[in-house]
C-alpha cells in the first residue's frame, strides 16, 4: 500500500507506545488525524514519548494512559478508564512486549513475559470488545512473530524449566492462538482481529539477549518506521482485499501459512479456558462478563 488514508474521527489505542514500533506507529496514526491513546508504563519515558508523538505528528490528539501491563489489576483499571473516557474504539493494537533472560515473577505471582506479552492483551481485548463493537469497523491487531514453539500447558510460566527465548516465543504463539480463537468468537460482529508479523526491526526489545542474537537482529532487521508502516498497511487494507479478513496472520501484506498446531481448535480452546480462569473474564457467544479476579492455577 503506497498511500495511507486519512484517519480523522478514528480512535486508536496502542500499547507499548513509549518506544520502538509502538511509538512510530503512534506517530503515523496521529499524523493521519486519528486520536491516539498511548498506553505506556508509568515513567518519565512515557511523557517524553507522548511529547515526541505530538511534536512529530503535529497533532495534539494524543492521550497518555499509564499502565503496567504485567499487572492484571492495572490492565483492568486501564480498560475501565478507556471505557469511561471514550464512547467508541476503532482500533486496538496489542504491541507491548518484553524479553527477559531470567524468570521474573510479578507481584501477582505471574511470570513477567507471559503476563505482559500474552495475558495482558487477552484481558485488555476482552474488556474492550464492547467498545470496539461500538465502531462500524472495529479492528484488533496483535503483533506477534512466526513461532514454532508449541505451548507447554504443564509449564506455562516456566515454573518447571525456564528457557528465555523459548518462553518468549511461546508468548507469541499464545497471542497467535488467541487471535484465531477470538476471530471465531467475534465473527458476525463489526469487530475483526488479525495478527501481524512486522518483520525484524532494530528496537530495544531483545536488549537482554546474547550478543550473537543481537548482532543477528541488527544485521537482518529493518528500521523501526518500516515495521510501523507494516502495521498501518494492514490496518488500512480493506477487509475485502484481505485473504482472511478476520483471523489472519500477515507479513508484508501477505497471509502467512499456519501449521496444523496453530490451527488446532482444541489447543486454542484449552488456552482460552485457562486464560479466562487466570484473568477472571468470560466471553461466550460474543457476550463479555467479568467473573472475578486473577487466579494463578
Ligand atoms: N522488533 C522486532 O524485530 C519484532 C519482530 C517481531 C515482532 N515484534 C513485536 O512487535 C512488538 C513491539 O516490539 P518492539 O520491537 O517495538 O519492542 P520495544 O522497542 O522493546 O518496545 C516495547 C514496548 O512495550 C512496552 N512495555 C514493555 N513492558 C511493558 C509493561 N509491563 N507495561 C506497559 N508497556 C510495556 C515498552 O515500554 P518501556 O519503554 O516502559 O519498556 C515499549 O514501549 C512486540 O509485540 C514484538 O514482539 C517485534
Image: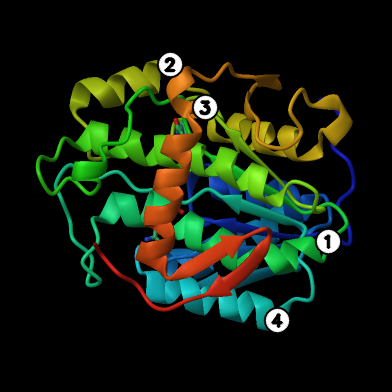
Q: Residue 78: image x %, image y %?
A: 53, 74
In this rendering, would 139 be left or right of 15?
Answer: right
Tag 4 and tag 2, C-beta contact below 8 Å: no
Name the image quarter holding residue 160. Answer: top left
Secondary structure at numbered mark 3: helix
Q: Is residue 219 above or below residue 290?
A: above
Q: Is residue 204 visible?
A: no
The Cα–Cα distance between marks 4 and 2, rounded to whole angstroms, is 41 Å
- Residue 135, label in figure: 1
Q: Is residue 125 visible?
A: yes
From the image, state whether disc 3 or disc 2 is nearer to you: 3
Closer-to-camera residue (13/33): 13
- Residue drawn 44% across and 64% down? 45
Name the image quarter holding residue 293. Answer: bottom left
Q: Residue 130: image x %, image y %?
A: 71, 68
Mark 3 lies on residue? 263
The Cα–Cα distance between marks 3 and 2, rounded to whole angstroms, is 29 Å
Secondary structure at numbered mark 2: helix
From the image, state whether disc 3 or disc 1 is nearer to you: 3
Binning the other alpha carbons within 10 Å of mark 1 as few (below 14), some (14 to 19) or many (20 upward) gives: some
Mark 4 lies on residue? 85
Q: Quadrant of the N terminus?
A: top right
Mark 2 lies on residue? 220
From the image, state whether disc 4 or disc 2 is nearer to you: 4
Does the residue tagged 3 have its C-beta within 8 Å of any atom of ligand 1?
Answer: no
Sequence-first disc among 3 and 2: 2
Name the image quarter holding residue 108. Answer: bottom left
From the image, state whether disc 4 or disc 1 is nearer to you: 1
Binning the other alpha carbons within 10 Å of mark 3 as few (below 14), some (14 to 19) or many (20 upward) gives: some
Amino acid at each position: 500500500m503506497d498511500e495511507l488514508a486519512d484517519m480523522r474521527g478514528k480512535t486508536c489505542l496502542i500499547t507499548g507506545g513509549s518506544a520502538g514500533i509502538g511509538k512510530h506507529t503512534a506517530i503515523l496514526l496521529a499524523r493521519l488525524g486519528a486520536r491516539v491513546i498511548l498506553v505506556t508504563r508509568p515513567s518519565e519515558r512515557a511523557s517524553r514519548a507522548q511529547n515526541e508523538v505530538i511534536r512529530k505528528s503535529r497533532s495534539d490528539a494524543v492521550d497518555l494512559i499509564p499502565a503496567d501491563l504485567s499487572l492484571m489489576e492495572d490492565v483492568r483499571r486501564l480498560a475501565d478508564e478507556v471505557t469511561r473516557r471514550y464512547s467508541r474504539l476503532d482500533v486496538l493494537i496489542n504491541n507491548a512486549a518484553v524479553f527477559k533472560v531470567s524468570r521474573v515473577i510479578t507481584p501477582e505471582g505471574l511470570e513477567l513475559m507471559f503476563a505482559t506479552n500474552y495475558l495482558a492483551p487477552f484481558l485488555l481485548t476482552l474488556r474492550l470488545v464492547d467498545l470496539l463493537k461500538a465502531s462500524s469497523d472495529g479492528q484488533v491487531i496483535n503483533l506477534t512473530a512466526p513461532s514454532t514453539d508449541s505451548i507447554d500447558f504443564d509449564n506455562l510460566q516456566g515454573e518447571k524449566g525456564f528457557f528465555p527465548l523459548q518462553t518468549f516465543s511461546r508468548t507469541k504463539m499464545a497471542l497467535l492462538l488467541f487471535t484465531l480463537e477470538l476471530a471465531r468468537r467475534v465473527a458476525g460482529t463489526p469487530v475483526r482481529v488479525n495478527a501481524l508479523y512486522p518483520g525484524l526491526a532494530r528496537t530495544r526489545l531483545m536488549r537482554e539477549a546474547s550478543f550473537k542474537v543481537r548482532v543477528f537482529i541488527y544485521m537482518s532487521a529493518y528500521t523501526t518506521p518500516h515495521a510501523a508502516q507494516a502495521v498501518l498497511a494492514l490496518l488500512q487494507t480493506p477487509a475485502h482485499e484481505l485473504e482472511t479478513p478476520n483471523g489472519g496472520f500477515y507479513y508484508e501484506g501477505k497471509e502467512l501459512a499456519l501449521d496444523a498446531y496453530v490451527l488446532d481448535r482444541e489447543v486454542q480452546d484449552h488456552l482460552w479456558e485457562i486464560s479466562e480462569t487466570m484473568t477472571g473474564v468470560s466471553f461466550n457467544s460474543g457476550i463479555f462478563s467479568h467473573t472475578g479476579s486473577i487466579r494463578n492455577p
